Amino acid sequence: MREARRLALMERQALIARVARRQALRGLAEALEAEARSEALAARSRQLVAASAPQPGAMAAEVFTARAIFAASLVQLAANAADAADDAARQSAWQADMLAQAETRAKRLAEREAEARAALDALKRRRAEADPPQLARKLQSRDLQSRDLQTRELKTLKVQN
């Protein structure tokens, strides 16, 4: 039955679309989480740079050098985290597009699946209305056989009389 095969195909495609949607949703959540982590790291690094700024008063050259190196590494860390946050934001936007595409495909396939299901149901209804049930045919054939047998018996009785 062509309609049943079409419905089975639509069900499989809808299942694949639902899986793709879940994956896109998970990817979006992970990208948003990475973006938030990177932004938090960049903000914290900037706070540490501000906190480690030279304090007024005398300071040994070695301590000053160590603080300058530490501050430079924090600035670099903040810059890297900001870049990672930008990358994560782009990834989030891309994942949002993928999710929208997956949802659109899932909706379209759900509609096609409903159409295929309706076509199959309509075909089954038409077949049920067009053909009397098989059981009735069997009963009709048995009824005809018994009528034929009765007719033969009557004929044999008439012939004998």
Image (cartoon, helix red, strand yellow):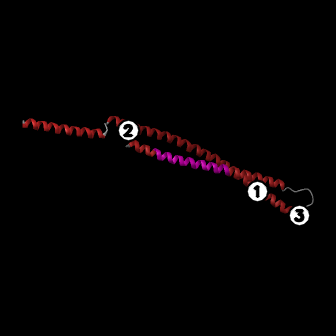
| Label disc, if present, on residue 61 of the rendered structure | 3
Was residue 31 drawn as part of the magenta stretch in this picture? yes
Q: Which residue was labeled with disc 1? A: 76
- The label nearer to you, 1 versus 2, is 2
**Real-space Cα distance between discs 3 and 1?**
22 Å
The answer to which quarter of the image holds residue 73 is bottom right
Q: Are marks 1 and 2 in contact (CB under 8 Å)?
A: no
Disc 1 residue type? Gln
Q: Which residue was labeled with disc 2? A: 124
Task: State the SS at label 3.
Answer: helix
Give the x, y percent position of residue 145.
20, 40
In front here: 110 or 42? 110
In front here: 61 or 6? 6
- Asked whether, in this view, residue 104 is left or right of residue 4, the answer is right
- Residue drawn at (81%, 60%) of the image: 70
Sort mark 2 into few (<14), some (14-19) or many (20+) by Cα contacts within 10 Å. Answer: few
Disc 3 residue type? Ala
Sort mark 1 into few (<14), some (14-19) or many (20+) by Cα contacts within 10 Å. Answer: some
Magenta residues, start to end:
10-33
Task: State the SS at label 2.
Answer: helix
**Real-space Cα distance between discs 2 and 3?**
91 Å
- The label nearer to you, 2 versus 3, is 2
Give the x, y percent position of residue 74.
78, 57
Mark nearer the N terminus (1 vs 2):
1
Was residue 153 drawn as part of the magenta stretch in this picture? no
Sort mark 3 into few (<14), some (14-19) or many (20+) by Cα contacts within 10 Å. Answer: few
Give the x, y percent position of residue 35.
69, 50
Outermost right residue: 57
Give the x, y percent position of residue 106.
53, 43
